[in-house]
Amino acid sequence: MMQGHEAFQRLMQITSEQFVSTCKDKGYRVLVANADRHGSIVWEAGRANGLNRFILLGLTEVELTSIPEGVIERTRQAIGDIEATFEAEVWVAADDNARFTRVLFDRWPVFLSEKILGTPAEGALSLVHRLNQAINRVEILTADDLTEEYLVSRGEGSHSAVASA
Amino acid sequence: MPSSRVATLLDWNFLEVERRVTIAGSLDVGPEIQPRQGTLIAEELAGRKLLRYLTPDQVGLFLAGTNRLTYVTPTPYAPEEMISWLFLPSPRIARTHVLLLDPAKIPLIQGPMWVAAGSGIQYVLPHGFPADAIIVPGAGAEARWELEVR
């Protein structure tokens, strides 16, 4: 794990800056940034706009062996030795306090090397574009997309268990 | 009814029905939620512990505690269930271990709150947790290690 590493700290800083600014520009409130959620580092933003709409960005450290060899080789040529590999994911989700949906919108590898200290990683550079696309996607979710039911409905005075078998 | 459903239902019933603690909604969470002293949360939980799940690569990393913002849950889940209930990224990576934390030993805690786009209940530790919050049931007071989830 890279959590004490200077390059890792830089990656977290770049990612946080880009996530916060992109979400705020689109009217999304950042709910959490750079938090450890049971093994993944997450950023989450939300907005009430007809539905409660959410964007979740996750970074999870993975073994280099989980990445295709061709991608590894091209990355090494571009940035040198790879010190850590993360799986980045962007999820879009929505709920109406009773039903919800969540969709994996994008997944890509993020490679960490010393070069990130001078030049932000390719993954971080493309993050703004990916987030903007994800926000466009989450904005078109409708009530018809909410296909899963919460165990307990949420919101003022609406607490009831959905405890059917 | 899968065990995760029963476990979460019992935790909801315990917190909101029996203890009269409001679980914050999906969008009612964030930095604005006032953190409370861990001793107060411990009273609400009446002896229950908080669970911080780990990937295999993280085993041993947090035995000295951490100051990173950290999510925890009161609910025990099997590895194949927690991904969905806690809405965890990278679902192919199993969270195979867990640290049990005594809320009374954690200075500040936010929550409880519902997981957005998931049915689980969670808390946030804004400044992480100290080493002495880690407990191992059945072992001595100084014991600090993870338990395998299986």
Image (cartoon, coloured by chain):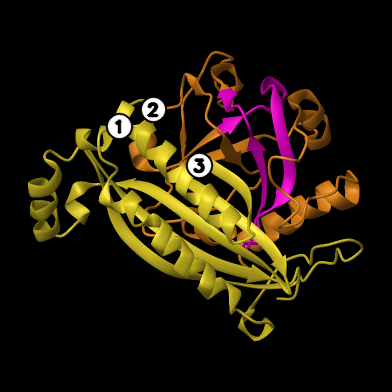
Tell me which amino acid carries mark 1. Ala
Instruction: State the mark number for residue B53.
Output: 3
* Percent coordinates x, y for residue A144 in the rendering: 65, 86
Residue appearing at x 30%, y 52% in the figure: A123
Residue A62 can be seen, yes or no: yes
Q: Chain of mark 3?
A: B
Residue B86 can be seen, yes or no: no
* Discs 2, 1: same chain: no
Query: Residue A161, relative to residue B140: is it above or below?
Result: below
Residue appearing at x 7%, y 48% in the figure: A77
Q: Which type of secondary structure does the marked residue at label 2 adopt?
A: loop
Part of the protein shown in magenta: B100-129
**A68 left or right of A37?**
left
Query: Residue A153, relative to residue A38: is it above or below?
Result: below
Q: Which residue is mark 1?
A: A7
Neighbor class of circle 3 (other Cα within 10 Å; few <14, some 14-19, many 20+) is: many
Q: Which residue is mark 2?
A: B60
Q: Which type of secondary structure does the marked residue at label 3 adopt?
A: strand
Q: Which chain is the one coloured yellow?
A: A
* Percent coordinates x, y for residue A52 in the rendering: 70, 67
Instruction: State the mark number for residue A108.
Output: none
**Front: mark 3 or 1:** 1
Q: Confirm or deny contact between disc 2 and disc 1 (CB under 8 A).
A: no
Neighbor class of circle 1 (other Cα within 10 Å; few <14, some 14-19, many 20+) is: many
Q: Which chain is the one coloured orange?
A: B
